[in-house]
Image (cartoon, grey):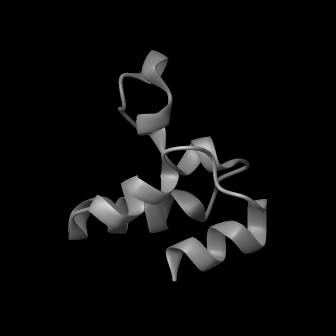
């Protein structure tokens, strides 16, 4: 469901996002779903894709 919502909202997912979704724990998946509510771009959901943030919310 997360993948579907992301692609509907943003189009193609960034490199690395698919593997983050597939390998996510239940807690990480919940975090992604929560971040999606306010996200303006896929990078707002997948903080791990931004090394400058240290992968932290």
Res 3 → quadrant: bottom right
Q: Quadrant of the C terminus?
A: top left
> In front: 32, or 38?
32
Name the side, left or right, on which 47 lies relative to 28: right
Task: Name the residue at the top extreme.
Answer: 52
Residue 23, x across and y down, in percent? 28, 60
Residue 15, x across and y down, in percent? 57, 44
Q: Image height check: is 41 above or below 6?
A: above
Residue 36, x across and y down, in percent? 57, 62
Name the side, left or right, on which 52 lies relative to 15: left
Q: In the image, what residue occupies the spot 37% across and 59% down? A: 31
Q: In the image, what residue occupies the spot 47% across and 68% down? A: 33
Q: Image height check: is 1 above or below 14?
A: below
> In front: 47, or 24?
24
Name the side, left or right, on which 42 lies relative to 2: right
Tell how many labels. Answer: 0
Q: In the image, what residue occupies the spot 35% across and 65% down? A: 22
Residue 52, x across and y down, in percent? 47, 16
């Amino acid at each position: 469901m997360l993948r579907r919502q992301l692609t509907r909202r943003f189009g193609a997912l960034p490199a690395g996002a698919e593997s983050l979704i597939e390998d996510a724990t239940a807690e990480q998946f919940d975090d992604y779903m929560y971040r999606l509510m306010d996200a303006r771009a896929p990078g707002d959901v997948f903080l791990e894709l931004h090394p400058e943030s240290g992968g932290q919310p």
